[in-house]
Image (cartoon, rainbow, N blue to C red):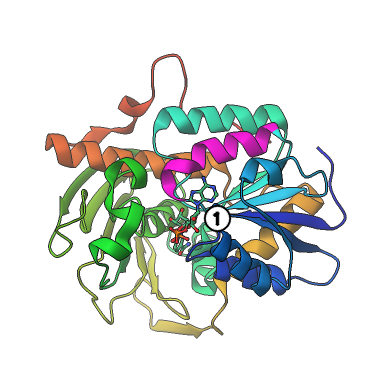
Amino acid sequence: MNKPSQLRVGLIGCGSIAADHVRGYLALAAGSGRLVAVADADPVRRADVSKLAGGVREYGDYTELLADSEIDAVDICLPHHLHRDAILAAAASGKHILAEKPLCLTAEEADEIGNAVTAAGVTLMCAHNQLFMPTVRRARELVDEGFCGDVHTVRTSDSFFVDFTPETMGWRANRLKSGGGELIDTGYHPAYLLLHLAGSEPTAVTAILSRYRLGFLDGEDSAQVSVRFGNGALGTLETSWAHDPAGTEKFALVGAEGALWGDGTTLWTRRRGQETHVEEFEPVDTFAAEIDHFVDSVRTGTRPVETHVEGTRVLEVILGAYRSSAEGRTVDLDELHPAGLGAGKGVDS
Ligand SMILES: NC(=O)c1ccc[n+]([C@@H]2O[C@H](COP(=O)([O-])OP(=O)(O)OC[C@H]3O[C@@H](n4cnc5c(N)ncnc54)[C@H](O)[C@@H]3O)[C@@H](O)[C@H]2O)c1
């Protein structure tokens, strides 16, 4: 696959998250990349986002955007049930892909995606924007350097109070379109953060889910998930649209020799028996950082921090959590791989 000197990107889906992505393209260094087109079935939404981007080409049908030879890459911001088809079509058109979470809805779809992007030789980066929080980057560096020793436990959280109504909730209220409820939506963030910090393959999942407030939702509005990792570490994530636990940290990790915990801008670290050290960071626009990383990865032909491989692992944890909650048992993640397909085991370059 070619490495374009300036990446020309088309944005597919001009809904609530599109403005955050546009801000990222507008912040790119001159000459590195730019947004050149948008697609959305809704003419008002695509016109608004085009205007925000400074006036770019508009398509009502994203397959027309994919046929545009002056586009090198696409940024997919569609409702969850449309991710698989859009990713497969983009790969078939030879476009590089930045894909909003979740990667797709099932292990079979993830397997198809892995095969398609590998065959097409395109880059797929999962838009896991919270990995670009400066505290998370530093925490991962410290874990890699062995600051905490062997990792024992990791904890992540992402909870807030939403005032959605059945009218404003749209496709998110429908299990067939969203893939579940809060866990596969906002809960995807603490799930990828958990896996990223643990630095090991998840092997088994136990979950309990609840619906406290949003009665019109097919799925849960709150979830607690425990994950066992191949290196022996245990992970826990808590996520909710029903409460706002102000003051809780985003992540915490305890190892044999030390611990660290943090939010978006402050990281606390402590070696066993020593004083706690505090590092403060300037806030980062995580969407702009993610888009900059995507553009740089494609232009230099380097692997982005998380591809469909990590995206599939995160999806497996979410799907395992849903199965665990439904069946009241711990789910071995190997159960999720359809026989003969090797779902979730996709390789990339
Ligand atoms: N990273 C984050 O923090 C974050 C936050 C919000 C949303 N998201 C993700 O972004 C994605 C989009 O979410 P959203 O909140 O923007 O949704 P949304 O409902 O606001 O927007 C979806 C857009 O897709 C368009 N659309 C639907 N079907 C289409 C089709 N067939 N062809 C073209 N356009 C079509 C709709 O008209 C709408 O404008 C989801 O995957 C979501 O999980 C991520």
- Say above or below: 307 vs 238: above
Q: Magenta region's main secondary structure?
A: helix
Residue beneath disc 1: 13
- Residue 155 in percent (x, y) is at 31, 61
- Residue 174 in percent (x, y) is at 28, 47
- Say above or below: 74 vs 55: above
Mark 1 residue type: Gly
Residue extending farthest to the front is 43
Range of magenta residues: 79-92
Q: Residue at point 39% right, 15% down?
A: 339
Q: Quadrant of residue 269?
A: bottom left
Residue 190 in view in this figure: yes
Q: Is residue 281 left or right of residue 263?
A: right
Find numbered disc 1 in the image and state the secondary structure of the residue it sits on: loop
Q: Residue at point 47% right, 19% down?
A: 341
Quarter of the image where the N terminus is located: top right
- Residue 346 in percent (x, y) is at 55, 30
Disc 1 under 8 Å from ligand 1? The reply is yes
- Say above or below: 314 vs 190: above
Q: Residue at point 69% right, 54% down?
A: 10
Q: Is residue 226 left or right of residue 64?
A: left
Residue extending farthest to the top is 340
Residue 344 in view in this figure: no
* Residue 86 belongs to the span the image colors magenta: yes
- Residue 59 in percent (x, y) is at 66, 52
- Closer to the camera in the image, 318 or 228: 318
Quarter of the image where the C terminus is located: top right
- Say above or below: 134 vs 236: below
- Closer to the camera in the image, 244 or 79: 79
Q: Residue at point 82% right, 64% down?
A: 32
* Residue 33 belongs to the span the image colors magenta: no
- Closer to the camera in the image, 37 or 30: 37
